[in-house]
Amino acid sequence: MSAIRAIRAVRGMNDILPDVIGAWHHVERNARDLLAAYGYEEIRPPMVERTELFRRSIGEVTDIVEKEMYTFDDRNSESLTLRPECTASVVRAAVEHGLLRTPGRRMWAMGPMFRYERPQKGRYRQFHQIDVEIFGVAAPSAEAELIVLTRRLWRALGINGLTLELNSLGSPDIQARYRARLVDHFSAHSSALDADSQRRIRTNPLRILDSKNPAMQGLIEEAPRIVEELDADARAHFDELLAMLDEAGVPYRLNHRLVRGLDYYTGTVFEWTTDALGAQGAVCGGGRYDNLVAEIGGAATPAIGFAIGLERLVALLEVQSVELPVVAPHAYLASAGTRAAILAHAVAERLRDAVPDLRLVVDAGSGSFKAKLKRADRCGARIALLLGEEEARVGQMAVKDLRSREPQSVVAIDELAGLVARSMGAG
Ligand code: HAM
Protein backbone atom coordinates (compact mmCIF):
# COMPACT_ATOMS: atom_id res chain seq x y z
CA MET A 1 0.00 0.00 0.00
CA SER A 2 1.53 3.35 -0.96
CA ALA A 3 1.48 6.22 1.56
CA ILE A 4 -0.62 9.25 0.70
CA ARG A 5 1.62 11.99 -0.68
CA ALA A 6 1.69 15.04 1.58
CA ILE A 7 0.67 18.33 -0.03
CA ARG A 8 3.33 21.01 0.16
CA ALA A 9 3.17 24.80 -0.02
CA VAL A 10 3.45 26.53 -3.40
CA ARG A 11 7.04 27.39 -4.37
CA GLY A 12 8.03 30.87 -3.21
CA MET A 13 5.08 31.13 -0.79
CA ASN A 14 6.17 30.68 2.79
CA ASP A 15 4.53 29.59 5.99
CA ILE A 16 5.43 32.06 8.69
CA LEU A 17 5.83 29.74 11.65
CA PRO A 18 5.24 30.41 15.36
CA ASP A 19 8.98 30.46 16.13
CA VAL A 20 9.46 33.63 14.06
CA ILE A 21 6.12 35.30 14.59
CA GLY A 22 7.51 37.34 17.50
CA ALA A 23 9.72 39.23 15.03
CA TRP A 24 6.76 39.90 12.75
CA HIS A 25 4.70 41.19 15.67
CA HIS A 26 7.59 43.39 16.77
CA VAL A 27 7.70 45.00 13.31
CA GLU A 28 3.94 45.26 12.89
CA ARG A 29 3.32 46.70 16.35
CA ASN A 30 6.03 49.34 16.03
CA ALA A 31 4.92 50.31 12.53
CA ARG A 32 1.27 50.59 13.56
CA ASP A 33 2.09 52.75 16.60
CA LEU A 34 4.49 54.98 14.71
CA LEU A 35 2.20 55.50 11.72
CA ALA A 36 -0.68 56.39 14.02
CA ALA A 37 1.56 58.83 15.88
CA TYR A 38 2.44 60.60 12.59
CA GLY A 39 -1.23 60.87 11.59
CA TYR A 40 -1.52 58.03 9.05
CA GLU A 41 -4.80 56.14 8.65
CA GLU A 42 -4.96 52.45 7.82
CA ILE A 43 -6.72 51.29 4.67
CA ARG A 44 -7.29 47.65 3.62
CA PRO A 45 -7.87 47.25 -0.10
CA PRO A 46 -8.63 43.77 -1.47
CA MET A 47 -5.85 41.49 -2.65
CA VAL A 48 -7.42 41.04 -6.08
CA GLU A 49 -7.99 43.86 -8.56
CA ARG A 50 -8.87 44.20 -12.20
CA THR A 51 -5.74 43.49 -14.26
CA GLU A 52 -6.20 46.81 -16.05
CA LEU A 53 -5.38 48.69 -12.83
CA PHE A 54 -1.84 47.33 -12.67
CA ARG A 55 -1.24 47.53 -16.41
CA ARG A 56 -2.12 51.19 -16.37
CA SER A 57 -0.26 52.16 -13.18
CA ILE A 58 2.88 50.01 -12.98
CA GLY A 59 3.44 50.18 -16.77
CA GLU A 60 3.09 47.71 -19.65
CA VAL A 61 6.82 47.27 -20.21
CA THR A 62 7.92 46.63 -16.66
CA ASP A 63 9.13 43.22 -15.44
CA ILE A 64 6.19 43.11 -13.05
CA VAL A 65 3.50 43.50 -15.71
CA GLU A 66 5.31 41.62 -18.47
CA LYS A 67 6.19 38.51 -16.56
CA GLU A 68 5.46 38.54 -12.84
CA MET A 69 1.73 38.96 -12.33
CA TYR A 70 -0.62 36.23 -11.15
CA THR A 71 -3.37 36.94 -13.64
CA PHE A 72 -6.44 34.80 -14.23
CA ASP A 73 -9.93 34.98 -15.65
CA ASP A 74 -12.69 34.59 -13.11
CA ARG A 75 -15.82 32.58 -13.86
CA ASN A 76 -17.27 35.63 -15.54
CA SER A 77 -14.26 35.86 -17.90
CA GLU A 78 -13.05 39.04 -16.28
CA SER A 79 -9.25 39.36 -16.08
CA LEU A 80 -8.18 39.74 -12.45
CA THR A 81 -4.73 39.93 -10.83
CA LEU A 82 -3.36 39.20 -7.38
CA ARG A 83 -1.84 42.53 -6.38
CA PRO A 84 1.91 42.67 -7.06
CA GLU A 85 2.11 45.87 -4.99
CA CYS A 86 -0.27 48.10 -3.10
CA THR A 87 0.10 51.67 -4.33
CA ALA A 88 -2.23 51.17 -7.30
CA SER A 89 -4.87 49.66 -5.01
CA VAL A 90 -4.62 52.43 -2.43
CA VAL A 91 -4.95 55.06 -5.17
CA ARG A 92 -7.88 53.22 -6.76
CA ALA A 93 -9.66 52.95 -3.40
CA ALA A 94 -8.92 56.57 -2.48
CA VAL A 95 -10.32 57.81 -5.80
CA GLU A 96 -13.32 55.48 -5.72
CA HIS A 97 -14.35 56.57 -2.22
CA GLY A 98 -13.56 60.26 -2.59
CA LEU A 99 -10.89 60.16 0.12
CA LEU A 100 -8.67 62.65 -1.66
CA ARG A 101 -11.08 65.55 -1.27
CA THR A 102 -9.22 66.22 2.00
CA PRO A 103 -5.71 67.36 1.01
CA GLY A 104 -2.70 66.03 2.87
CA ARG A 105 -4.33 62.66 3.46
CA ARG A 106 -1.90 60.09 4.79
CA MET A 107 -2.62 56.37 4.49
CA TRP A 108 -1.00 53.02 5.03
CA ALA A 109 -1.77 49.41 4.23
CA MET A 110 -0.20 46.10 5.13
CA GLY A 111 -0.46 42.61 3.69
CA PRO A 112 0.70 40.04 1.17
CA MET A 113 1.75 40.89 -2.40
CA PHE A 114 2.32 38.42 -5.23
CA ARG A 115 5.00 38.40 -7.92
CA TYR A 116 6.02 35.45 -10.04
CA GLU A 117 9.76 36.01 -9.57
CA ARG A 118 12.52 33.43 -9.35
CA PRO A 119 12.55 32.63 -5.63
CA GLN A 120 15.80 33.06 -3.75
CA LYS A 121 16.86 34.32 -0.32
CA GLY A 122 14.89 37.53 0.28
CA ARG A 123 12.82 37.16 -2.89
CA TYR A 124 9.54 35.29 -2.76
CA ARG A 125 6.38 34.89 -4.79
CA GLN A 126 4.19 35.85 -1.85
CA PHE A 127 5.79 38.51 0.31
CA HIS A 128 4.49 41.17 2.68
CA GLN A 129 4.71 44.92 2.59
CA ILE A 130 3.87 47.85 4.78
CA ASP A 131 2.83 50.44 2.23
CA VAL A 132 2.68 54.13 3.18
CA GLU A 133 1.32 56.97 1.01
CA ILE A 134 0.81 60.76 1.29
CA PHE A 135 -1.63 62.47 -1.08
CA GLY A 136 -1.95 66.14 -1.99
CA VAL A 137 1.48 67.45 -0.91
CA ALA A 138 3.64 68.66 -3.80
CA ALA A 139 6.42 70.09 -1.61
CA PRO A 140 9.51 68.08 -0.66
CA SER A 141 8.37 68.13 2.96
CA ALA A 142 6.36 65.00 2.07
CA GLU A 143 9.53 63.19 1.01
CA ALA A 144 11.31 64.39 4.14
CA GLU A 145 8.50 63.21 6.39
CA LEU A 146 8.51 59.71 4.89
CA ILE A 147 12.25 59.48 5.28
CA VAL A 148 12.41 60.65 8.91
CA LEU A 149 9.50 58.35 9.71
CA THR A 150 11.33 55.33 8.32
CA ARG A 151 14.49 56.32 10.15
CA ARG A 152 12.49 56.42 13.39
CA LEU A 153 11.02 53.00 12.60
CA TRP A 154 14.47 51.44 12.11
CA ARG A 155 15.52 52.91 15.47
CA ALA A 156 12.37 51.70 17.24
CA LEU A 157 12.96 48.21 15.86
CA GLY A 158 16.62 48.18 16.93
CA ILE A 159 17.94 47.94 13.36
CA ASN A 160 21.01 49.84 12.24
CA GLY A 161 23.34 50.18 9.30
CA LEU A 162 20.72 50.91 6.61
CA THR A 163 21.78 53.29 3.84
CA LEU A 164 19.39 55.80 2.32
CA GLU A 165 19.84 56.01 -1.46
CA LEU A 166 18.27 58.88 -3.35
CA ASN A 167 17.73 59.94 -6.93
CA SER A 168 15.37 62.20 -8.85
CA LEU A 169 13.77 60.96 -12.06
CA GLY A 170 12.06 64.23 -12.88
CA SER A 171 8.83 64.67 -14.80
CA PRO A 172 7.75 62.38 -17.66
CA ASP A 173 9.14 64.97 -20.13
CA ILE A 174 12.52 64.91 -18.44
CA GLN A 175 12.44 61.12 -18.37
CA ALA A 176 11.61 61.04 -22.09
CA ARG A 177 14.56 63.32 -22.92
CA TYR A 178 16.84 61.28 -20.70
CA ARG A 179 15.59 58.04 -22.23
CA ALA A 180 16.55 59.32 -25.68
CA ARG A 181 20.08 60.16 -24.49
CA LEU A 182 20.41 56.74 -22.87
CA VAL A 183 19.24 55.02 -26.05
CA ASP A 184 21.91 56.94 -28.01
CA HIS A 185 24.59 55.98 -25.53
CA PHE A 186 23.72 52.30 -25.29
CA SER A 187 22.96 51.91 -29.03
CA ALA A 188 26.44 53.21 -29.81
CA HIS A 189 27.83 50.32 -27.73
CA SER A 190 25.16 47.74 -28.37
CA SER A 191 27.64 44.90 -28.97
CA ALA A 192 28.76 45.29 -25.34
CA LEU A 193 25.21 44.79 -24.02
CA ASP A 194 23.80 41.47 -22.82
CA ALA A 195 20.62 40.09 -24.39
CA ASP A 196 18.37 41.49 -21.66
CA SER A 197 19.77 44.99 -22.08
CA GLN A 198 19.57 44.77 -25.89
CA ARG A 199 15.86 44.16 -25.46
CA ARG A 200 15.57 46.96 -22.92
CA ILE A 201 17.04 49.55 -25.28
CA ARG A 202 13.76 49.29 -27.12
CA THR A 203 11.41 48.71 -24.17
CA ASN A 204 12.72 50.32 -20.99
CA PRO A 205 16.27 51.72 -21.34
CA LEU A 206 16.32 53.17 -17.80
CA ARG A 207 16.29 49.64 -16.45
CA ILE A 208 19.66 48.94 -18.08
CA LEU A 209 21.12 51.13 -15.31
CA ASP A 210 19.88 48.50 -12.85
CA SER A 211 21.87 45.69 -14.46
CA LYS A 212 24.18 43.78 -12.16
CA ASN A 213 26.11 42.19 -15.07
CA PRO A 214 29.80 42.88 -14.21
CA ALA A 215 30.74 43.08 -17.89
CA MET A 216 28.48 46.10 -18.40
CA GLN A 217 29.41 48.16 -15.35
CA GLY A 218 31.94 50.35 -17.20
CA LEU A 219 29.44 51.21 -19.91
CA ILE A 220 26.77 52.01 -17.33
CA GLU A 221 29.15 54.26 -15.39
CA GLU A 222 29.86 56.22 -18.58
CA ALA A 223 26.15 56.63 -19.34
CA PRO A 224 24.60 60.11 -19.09
CA ARG A 225 23.07 60.89 -15.69
CA ILE A 226 19.51 61.98 -15.19
CA VAL A 227 20.51 64.87 -12.91
CA GLU A 228 22.01 66.49 -16.01
CA GLU A 229 18.52 66.58 -17.53
CA LEU A 230 16.61 67.94 -14.52
CA ASP A 231 15.02 71.34 -15.13
CA ALA A 232 15.24 74.20 -12.64
CA ASP A 233 12.03 73.20 -10.79
CA ALA A 234 13.01 69.57 -10.41
CA ARG A 235 16.51 70.56 -9.33
CA ALA A 236 15.16 73.05 -6.76
CA HIS A 237 12.72 70.46 -5.39
CA PHE A 238 15.48 67.90 -4.98
CA ASP A 239 17.91 70.41 -3.46
CA GLU A 240 15.29 71.49 -0.93
CA LEU A 241 14.77 67.87 0.07
CA LEU A 242 18.51 67.40 0.52
CA ALA A 243 18.63 70.53 2.69
CA MET A 244 15.80 69.16 4.84
CA LEU A 245 17.61 65.85 5.28
CA ASP A 246 20.88 67.63 6.14
CA GLU A 247 19.01 69.71 8.73
CA ALA A 248 17.36 66.61 10.21
CA GLY A 249 20.72 64.80 10.32
CA VAL A 250 19.77 62.02 7.90
CA PRO A 251 22.77 60.80 5.91
CA TYR A 252 22.10 59.76 2.30
CA ARG A 253 23.90 58.56 -0.78
CA LEU A 254 23.00 60.00 -4.17
CA ASN A 255 22.62 57.08 -6.57
CA HIS A 256 22.08 58.15 -10.15
CA ARG A 257 21.45 54.52 -11.12
CA LEU A 258 18.43 54.20 -8.85
CA VAL A 259 15.53 54.02 -11.32
CA ARG A 260 13.07 51.63 -9.56
CA GLY A 261 11.01 48.98 -11.30
CA LEU A 262 7.66 50.73 -11.63
CA ASP A 263 6.80 53.32 -14.26
CA TYR A 264 4.64 55.67 -12.22
CA TYR A 265 7.44 57.66 -10.56
CA THR A 266 7.75 61.32 -11.50
CA GLY A 267 10.41 62.81 -9.24
CA THR A 268 12.28 61.79 -6.10
CA VAL A 269 12.90 58.07 -5.68
CA PHE A 270 14.57 56.43 -2.71
CA GLU A 271 15.53 53.11 -1.20
CA TRP A 272 16.84 52.00 2.17
CA THR A 273 19.39 49.28 1.52
CA THR A 274 21.66 46.94 3.44
CA ASP A 275 24.53 44.74 2.39
CA ALA A 276 23.83 42.34 5.26
CA LEU A 277 21.24 40.35 3.29
CA GLY A 278 23.12 39.38 0.14
CA ALA A 279 21.73 40.23 -3.29
CA GLN A 280 18.27 41.33 -2.12
CA GLY A 281 19.43 44.37 -0.19
CA ALA A 282 16.49 46.78 -0.66
CA VAL A 283 14.44 46.77 2.51
CA CYS A 284 12.25 49.72 1.58
CA GLY A 285 11.63 51.59 -1.66
CA GLY A 286 9.43 54.37 -2.90
CA GLY A 287 9.11 57.72 -4.54
CA ARG A 288 6.95 60.50 -5.89
CA TYR A 289 4.21 59.70 -8.38
CA ASP A 290 2.40 62.97 -9.12
CA ASN A 291 0.47 61.73 -12.19
CA LEU A 292 -0.90 58.41 -11.03
CA VAL A 293 -4.06 59.62 -9.30
CA ALA A 294 -5.17 61.37 -12.51
CA GLU A 295 -4.17 58.36 -14.62
CA ILE A 296 -6.45 56.19 -12.52
CA GLY A 297 -9.33 58.59 -13.01
CA GLY A 298 -9.09 60.93 -10.03
CA ALA A 299 -8.49 64.69 -9.91
CA ALA A 300 -4.81 65.57 -10.40
CA THR A 301 -3.20 65.02 -6.97
CA PRO A 302 0.50 64.93 -6.16
CA ALA A 303 1.48 61.84 -4.20
CA ILE A 304 4.43 60.03 -2.73
CA GLY A 305 4.95 56.82 -0.81
CA PHE A 306 7.09 53.81 -0.07
CA ALA A 307 6.77 50.16 0.81
CA ILE A 308 8.82 48.12 3.25
CA GLY A 309 9.47 44.44 2.49
CA LEU A 310 8.67 42.66 5.72
CA GLU A 311 10.47 39.38 4.97
CA ARG A 312 13.70 41.34 4.46
CA LEU A 313 13.18 43.45 7.57
CA VAL A 314 12.53 40.35 9.67
CA ALA A 315 15.65 38.71 8.18
CA LEU A 316 17.63 41.79 9.19
CA LEU A 317 16.37 41.56 12.78
CA GLU A 318 17.69 38.02 12.80
CA VAL A 319 21.05 38.86 11.18
CA GLN A 320 21.58 41.75 13.60
CA SER A 321 20.50 39.58 16.56
CA VAL A 322 18.00 42.20 17.68
CA GLU A 323 16.56 41.23 21.03
CA LEU A 324 12.82 40.86 20.78
CA PRO A 325 10.34 41.58 23.53
CA VAL A 326 9.38 38.29 25.19
CA VAL A 327 5.69 37.60 25.55
CA ALA A 328 5.72 34.39 27.55
CA PRO A 329 2.71 33.43 29.67
CA HIS A 330 2.76 34.67 33.25
CA ALA A 331 1.22 31.47 34.55
CA TYR A 332 0.54 27.90 33.46
CA LEU A 333 -2.28 25.96 35.04
CA ALA A 334 -2.23 22.16 35.01
CA SER A 335 -4.69 19.73 36.51
CA ALA A 336 -4.70 15.98 37.08
CA GLY A 337 -7.81 13.87 37.65
CA THR A 338 -11.41 14.24 36.57
CA ARG A 339 -12.66 16.54 39.32
CA ALA A 340 -9.64 18.83 38.96
CA ALA A 341 -10.04 18.93 35.18
CA ILE A 342 -13.68 19.97 35.57
CA LEU A 343 -12.61 22.81 37.86
CA ALA A 344 -9.57 23.97 35.85
CA HIS A 345 -11.21 26.24 33.27
CA ALA A 346 -13.58 27.75 35.83
CA VAL A 347 -10.63 28.67 38.07
CA ALA A 348 -8.68 29.99 35.08
CA GLU A 349 -11.58 32.20 34.01
CA ARG A 350 -11.94 33.61 37.55
CA LEU A 351 -8.25 34.46 37.50
CA ARG A 352 -8.52 36.13 34.09
CA ASP A 353 -11.46 38.19 35.40
CA ALA A 354 -9.56 39.23 38.49
CA VAL A 355 -6.08 39.95 37.09
CA PRO A 356 -5.87 42.49 34.26
CA ASP A 357 -3.48 41.66 31.38
CA LEU A 358 -2.89 38.16 32.71
CA ARG A 359 -1.41 35.73 30.21
CA LEU A 360 -2.48 32.32 31.46
CA VAL A 361 -2.21 29.02 29.61
CA VAL A 362 -4.27 26.02 30.67
CA ASP A 363 -2.48 22.75 30.04
CA ALA A 364 -4.20 20.70 27.38
CA GLY A 365 -2.04 17.59 27.35
CA SER A 366 -2.04 14.31 29.18
CA GLY A 367 0.65 12.73 31.36
CA SER A 368 2.05 13.16 34.84
CA PHE A 369 2.44 16.45 36.73
CA LYS A 370 6.14 16.10 35.98
CA ALA A 371 5.44 16.15 32.24
CA LYS A 372 3.07 19.08 32.68
CA LEU A 373 5.66 21.02 34.68
CA LYS A 374 8.13 20.45 31.89
CA ARG A 375 5.66 21.94 29.41
CA ALA A 376 5.06 24.88 31.74
CA ASP A 377 8.78 25.50 31.96
CA ARG A 378 9.28 25.21 28.20
CA CYS A 379 6.62 27.83 27.40
CA GLY A 380 8.50 30.33 29.57
CA ALA A 381 5.80 30.83 32.23
CA ARG A 382 6.93 32.28 35.53
CA ILE A 383 4.69 30.20 37.79
CA ALA A 384 2.89 26.89 37.52
CA LEU A 385 -0.50 26.39 39.20
CA LEU A 386 -1.13 22.75 39.95
CA LEU A 387 -4.54 21.36 40.68
CA GLY A 388 -4.71 17.70 41.80
CA GLU A 389 -7.76 15.74 42.99
CA GLU A 390 -7.02 16.47 46.67
CA GLU A 391 -6.50 20.21 46.08
CA ALA A 392 -9.69 20.31 44.04
CA ARG A 393 -11.61 18.70 46.87
CA VAL A 394 -10.42 21.20 49.51
CA GLY A 395 -10.38 24.32 47.27
CA GLN A 396 -6.61 24.76 47.14
CA MET A 397 -3.91 24.87 44.57
CA ALA A 398 -0.16 24.15 44.57
CA VAL A 399 1.95 27.00 43.25
CA LYS A 400 5.47 26.55 41.93
CA ASP A 401 7.76 29.41 40.99
CA LEU A 402 9.47 28.07 37.87
CA ARG A 403 12.25 30.66 37.92
CA SER A 404 13.47 30.07 41.50
CA ARG A 405 14.46 27.06 43.53
CA GLU A 406 11.83 27.74 46.22
CA PRO A 407 9.74 24.72 47.15
CA GLN A 408 6.16 24.83 45.97
CA SER A 409 3.51 26.27 48.29
CA VAL A 410 -0.19 25.61 48.69
CA VAL A 411 -2.74 28.44 48.62
CA ALA A 412 -6.50 28.68 48.79
CA ILE A 413 -8.01 29.13 45.34
CA ASP A 414 -9.66 32.32 46.61
CA GLU A 415 -6.25 33.84 47.30
CA LEU A 416 -4.76 32.85 44.00
CA ALA A 417 -5.52 36.12 42.16
CA GLY A 418 -3.46 38.23 44.58
CA LEU A 419 -0.55 35.85 44.40
CA VAL A 420 -0.60 35.69 40.60
CA ALA A 421 -0.82 39.49 40.31
CA ARG A 422 2.18 39.88 42.66
CA SER A 423 4.21 37.36 40.66
CA MET A 424 3.53 39.34 37.47
CA GLY A 425 5.05 42.40 39.08
CA ALA A 426 8.08 40.41 40.14
CA GLY A 427 9.52 40.52 36.59
P1 HAM B 1 9.05 47.87 -4.66
O1 HAM B 1 10.43 48.42 -4.66
O2 HAM B 1 8.64 47.03 -5.82
O3 HAM B 1 8.07 49.08 -4.50
O4 HAM B 1 8.84 47.01 -3.36
C1 HAM B 1 9.11 47.56 -2.08
C2 HAM B 1 9.85 46.56 -1.22
O5 HAM B 1 9.14 45.32 -1.18
C3 HAM B 1 11.23 46.19 -1.74
O6 HAM B 1 12.19 47.14 -1.35
C4 HAM B 1 11.44 44.85 -1.05
O7 HAM B 1 11.87 45.05 0.29
C5 HAM B 1 10.05 44.25 -1.03
N1 HAM B 1 9.89 43.28 -2.13
C6 HAM B 1 9.60 43.53 -3.42
N2 HAM B 1 9.53 42.38 -4.13
C7 HAM B 1 9.78 41.37 -3.25
C8 HAM B 1 9.84 39.94 -3.35
N3 HAM B 1 9.60 39.31 -4.49
N4 HAM B 1 10.12 39.23 -2.23
C9 HAM B 1 10.35 39.85 -1.06
N5 HAM B 1 10.29 41.19 -0.90
C10 HAM B 1 10.01 41.95 -1.98
C11 HAM B 1 6.71 48.98 -4.46
O8 HAM B 1 6.11 47.94 -4.36
C12 HAM B 1 6.01 50.33 -4.48
N6 HAM B 1 4.56 50.09 -4.45
C13 HAM B 1 6.47 51.21 -3.33
C14 HAM B 1 5.79 52.53 -3.33
C15 HAM B 1 4.76 52.91 -2.53
N7 HAM B 1 6.05 53.54 -4.12
C16 HAM B 1 5.23 54.56 -3.86
N8 HAM B 1 4.41 54.17 -2.88
Image (cartoon, rainbow, N blue to C red):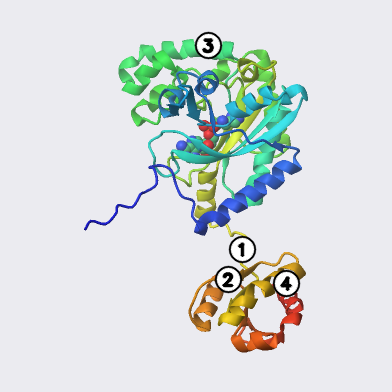
Amino acid at the residue labelled 2: Gly
Can you identify the residue that label 2 sits on? 380
Residue closer to the observer: 307 or 142: 307
Looking at the rendered structure, which numbered label has been put on residue 49? none
Which sits earlier in the primary sequence, circle 2 or circle 3? Answer: 3
Counting from the top left corner in percent of width and height, residue 416 is at 73, 79
Cα separation between marks 1 and 3: 53 Å
- Name the residue located 51 percent from the left edge and 45 percent from the top edge: 311
Task: Say which element carries label 2.
Answer: loop
Counting from the top left corner in percent of width and height, residue 235 is at 65, 19
Which sits earlier in the primary sequence, circle 1 or circle 3? Answer: 3
Task: Say which element carries label 1.
Answer: loop
Cα separation between marks 4 and 1: 25 Å
Looking at the rendered structure, which numbered label has been put on residue 350? 4
- Name the residue located 55 percent from the left edge and 70 percent from the top edge: 379
Task: Say which element carries label 3.
Answer: helix
Which sits earlier in the primary sequence, circle 3 or circle 4? Answer: 3
